[in-house]
Image (spheres, grey):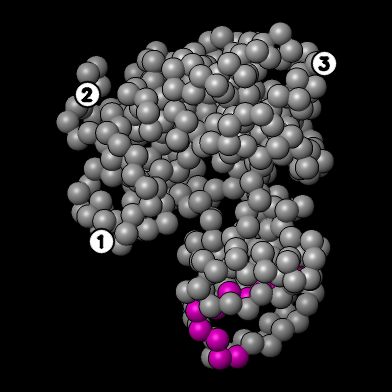
Amino acid sequence: MTGANRNNTQVLIMAGGVGSRFWPKSRNQFPKQFIDILGLGKSLLQLTYERFLKICPNNQIYILTNADYADLVKEQLPEVLIENILLEPSRNNTAPCIAYASYKIAKSNSDANIVVAPSDHLILKEEDFLAKVKQALAFTESNDALLTLGISPTRPDTGYGYIKYQVSNFKNLDDDSGIKKVHAFMEKPSLSKAQGYLQSGDYVWNAGIFIWSAKAVKNAFEKYAPEIASLFASGHEFYNTDNEAEFIMENYPTAPNISIDYAILEKADNVYTIPADIGWSDLGTWASLHAVAQKDGHNNAISCEHLNLSATTDCLIQLPWGKAAVIKGLSNFIVVDDGKVLLIYPKSDEQEIKRVASEMVEAFGDEYK
């Protein structure tokens, strides 16, 4: 398979989420994609952006984010073109923001080949990831296909959606291409179902990383989400002009609140996946960060300067730099101090943190949101 035309490759990095499961570090005004959550000196957004510079030049990378985060994006990615920072005036889920970007890009390059990726995921095997993306781009450049990068599961995880693909070869696909026709999207499963998925060998995790041509995704919107297609097609004359922002401000909030999965992917019959082992984590929770972070001899993931630690195991500890702490006798806990809020919570109960954060805001005010 020949490589895709680099000049047609466009990347959409979605950076508008709140990341409420990483409270208190991730707040409405400074969500997790802008945080150096890995202790590498760069935010997750910056790491994602740098990764895609190996796919295409910076003028072909777009940042999709909420209008509230415009200044954060400009501060962290000063080299991104201002016109490539696409601002959502409201939170309407992923389908409208992807449609907006796709119709805008298609106006300037009808042959565009688009990668859509979250801004806040971890990818440890970067070269393997880039190779899979390039393979996907070559496929979508010459096929009317919607392709999602699937993650080869390493455990029966109940926190992810799954994709079931067809094991038998599908038309025009080489046996060794690795590209599979998608049979169905599966909701987050029970443990027993997840164990079955893992054993069957024909399921992958849905990572929310998509590759398709502008033509293919526009066709899909027109066929499966005509309301969204009509809305953003009506802005054709305004895209890439001084009137674009006004059009989006007025019309974007009227778009349906729906994910790209529900709007298109679960309905379409031209969806494919490439199973990939890329060292991926969505970093959706503190426990998922603990799983990939560097740890001491007692399985503690520690990010702080001064810590007296004893009889403590399997914990994640993040404290402000320069703050000293003494911790003894904890096991399997999250300890996070962002300077405003101190969270000490069992790692096994971390699914409650989103609710607890809401209760704190209700009890003590929006400054804790």
At numbered mark 1, what does the secondary structure look like: helix, strand or loop? helix
The question of residue 199 being in magenta is answered with no
The question of residue 335 being in magenta is answered with yes
Q: Quadrant of residue 93?
A: top right
Who's the residue at 37% across and 25% down the image?
Answer: 268
Residue stretch in magenta: 328-339
- Residue at numbered disc 1: 192
Q: Which mark is first along the chain, 3 or 2?
A: 2
Q: CA distance from mark 1 to mark 2?
A: 29 Å
Tags 1 and 2 in contact by the CB under 8 Å rule?
A: no
Rendered location of residue 185, percent (x, y): 34, 39
Who's the residue at 54% across and 48% down the image?
Answer: 121
- Residue at numbered disc 2: 170
Who's the residue at 76% across and 32% down the image?
Answer: 79
Rendered location of residue 2, percent (x, y): 38, 16
Which three-letter amino acid code belongs to the residue tagged 1? Ser
- Say whether residue 358 is left or right of residue 321: left
Task: For label 2, count other residues whose C-alpha is less than 10 Å away and answer few (under 14), some (14-19) or many (20+).
Answer: few
- Say whether residue 17 is left or right of residue 289: right
Against 94, is 42 above or below?
Answer: below
Rendered location of residue 57, percent (x, y): 64, 24
- Residue at numbered disc 3: 242
Rendered-image quadrant of the C terminus? bottom right
Of tags 2 and 3, which is closer to the observer? 3
Which three-letter amino acid code belongs to the residue tagged 2? Phe
Task: For label 1, count other residues whose C-alpha is less than 10 Å away and answer few (under 14), some (14-19) or many (20+).
Answer: few
Single out the residue that lies furthest toward the left. 168
Pick the residue in front: 357 or 197: 357
Q: Quadrant of residue 363?
A: bottom right
Q: Which mark is first along the chain, 2 or 1?
A: 2
Tags 2 and 3 in contact by the CB under 8 Å rule?
A: no
